[in-house]
Image (spheres, coloured by chain):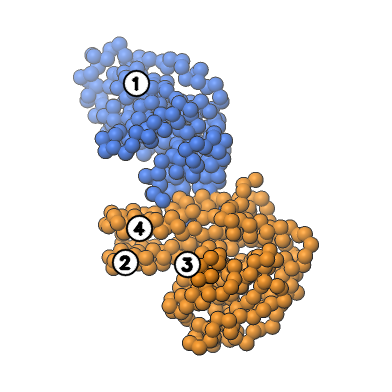
Chain colours: A orange, B blue
Amino acid sequence: MGQLFQKKEIFAVGGGKGGTGKSFFAVNLAIVLARGNHRTLLIDADLGGANLHTCLGIPAPESTLSDFIQSPTLRIEDVIVETPLANLRLISGAQDILDIANPKYTQKIKLIRAIQTLEIDFVILDLGAGTNYNTLDFFMVADKGILVVIPEPTSIENAYRFIKSALYRKLKMLASDPQTKGIIEKAMDKKNAYGLRTPVELLDFITQENATTGEFLRREMNRFQPRIVLNQVRSLADVRIGYLMQNACRKYFGVQVDFLGYIENDDQVWQSVRKRQPITLNGGYSKITQSFQIITQNLIQGLQLKPE
Amino acid sequence: MKSLRSQNYYEVLGISRYASPDEIRDAYELSKLTFTQNSMATYSLFSEDENREILDLITKACETLLNPELRREYDTYLDSGDKADRPSWEEREVALLAQGHAHRQQGGMLHNGVSTSEAPIGRGGAMESPTQESPHSETRSMNSMKGANDAERYIESVETYTGESLRRFREIKGLALSDLANSTKIRNTYIGYIEEENFSGLPAAVYVKGFVKLIAQALGLPADKVTHDYMIRYRSLEGKNQA
Ligand SMILES: Nc1ncnc2c1ncn2[C@@H]1O[C@H](COP(=O)(O)OP(=O)(O)OP(=O)(O)O)[C@@H](O)[C@H]1O
Ligand SMILES: [Mg+2]
């Protein structure tokens, strides 16, 4: 029963829009955790565009996450590879486009169960772009979901879409009666017949129909607490967008979003990506490394960035 | 989380019951940035009208909580529980403000596109001064019969209600400012400012809206249309003042 006492947290990194720096963030978060003597497992759950091994500067592993998900005989240990860094291990994603699996929810649960048996402290799932069900499901089964957002309208819009889709999917799964499920399903469509625009309105509506279900879902909604990290920040005004998004989410979604911190836009980042050497590995004391340390602390301690 | 309309002012601003004035002001500044038009953080979530509605509510919340007297009243109100027969806070608040209790002491501290602003601190002195009496006040009883016909004709002739039309209508009815103040429980200086469209002397837009509605009702005018017309005018004139 040793595992009962083992603290293990699963983080999922998503955010909707492509190219915002999700993989960059996931890799460097993993490195900061591993450097801090936490046993860390990085999983490339971007089933369409796996590239974490490249980000880490290691060759493509033979067995991948898809193999584990598809094969009834492979154990999770069989697809884990060591990295040059102590305390950091990797499960790589699908290499070949033909390998792209479309795992069912039960298969994803199989992965999460397997993870629970490992002697490990932290697990990081890099989800890739988009809001398809795979991505949303991984986001929901994680203990903490992180959205990497850049201060641009499209990225912010996608992040909101991501939050809304994840929340509605979660509520729909939790709702036990078909009537409520039906209402949520309809509400997912922006132009629904009920005229429900926001999750807050949806919950009010459900509560009117069925008070017990409404209250239950409201409690679950209060537990849904996505985190955001602002990447590629160029000014102080950009940083403020984190707080503004938080404020907007509270009003629109009725959801508490934690703003973990920000990472500046820095030429060193793409240089490090090009050299396939994660920036936090360079050692030394850079602004970027410092940002990652702040974000990591806030993430594991359940805190947020303190306003200046 | 409750819908915005059912949240109390502390929840609206996302602050604790014990928040200091500085925390209230910070929350307000943040909200102002969040819900301005074309804000990157909200353009894909809220329409312009919704943003304005939220900002109105936030302004109101902030003005109430920054005013020690009103805040005390509000806290008492919150603590009094959610009884069905309890009058709404809006009713209580309009009554308090109308009587000149707890008018904005921090005048001019909160400004955005909607609320009144730039009123210098210490404006309170000017608010106490009596406004001119209606020239018709002495001939009121004589006018009341004829007033009814004039009033009807006047309502038909008005396309858009303004401060001026409120004044004209009050005079047609043969009412002095003080009469209207008595029946609406709004201070006569405020009624005067509303008629003059002197917005800098008035509290935030939401209150003005409440006042105009009360005045319209007291005068027997179509309250919704009057309020609607007046607030459109208010916003456009406010916009010009700020530009
Ligand atoms: N803070 C930053 N400063 C400068 N460049 C950055 C920064 N963060 C990310 N980049 C650049 O953005 C590019 C995309 O990063 P990355 O591959 O991590 O994005 P992603 O969100 O994982 O993309 P995808 O959606 O395709 O998975 C990289 O080439 C990287 O150089
Ligand atoms: Mg990626």
- Element under label 3? helix
Judged from this view, the residue extending furthest toward the top is: B138
Do marks 2 and 1 both belong to one polypeptide chain? Answer: no
For label 3, the residue is: A140
Q: Which residue is mark 1?
A: B181
Instruction: Give the alpha-carbon distance from disc 4 to disc 2, as whole Å.
Output: 11 Å
Tag 3: Cα neighbours inside 10 Å, few (<14), some, or many (≥20)? some
User: Given the image, what chain letter belongs to the residue carrying mark 1?
Assistant: B
Q: Secondary structure at mark 4?
A: helix
- The chain containing the residue under callout 2 comes to A
- Kindly indicate whether the residues beneath marks 1 and 4 are on one polypeptide chain: no
Element on which disc 2 rests? loop
Q: Is residue A96 visible?
A: yes
SS type, badge 1: helix
Which numbered circle lies on residue A216?
Answer: 4
Q: CA distance from mark 1 to mark 3?
A: 58 Å
- Callout 2 crowding tier (Cα within 10 Å): few <14, some 14–19, many ≥20: few
Label 4 – label 3 distance at C-alpha: 17 Å
Q: Are marks 1 and 3 in contact (CB under 8 Å)?
A: no
Contact between labelled residues 4 and 1, with CB atoms less than 8 Å apart: no
Amino acid type, mark 3? Met
What's the distance in space between the residues labelled 1 and 4, CA to CA? 49 Å
Pick out the residue farthest to the left: B145
Residue designated by label 2: A176
- Picture residue at 46% right of the left edge, 48% below the top: B51
What type is the residue that disc 1 sits on?
Ala
Please state which of the two labelled residues, at mark 2 or mark 1, is closer to the viewer.
2
Q: Amino acid at mark 2?
A: Ser
Q: Position of residue B146 (x, y in %)?
A: 22, 20
Output the chain of dot 4: A
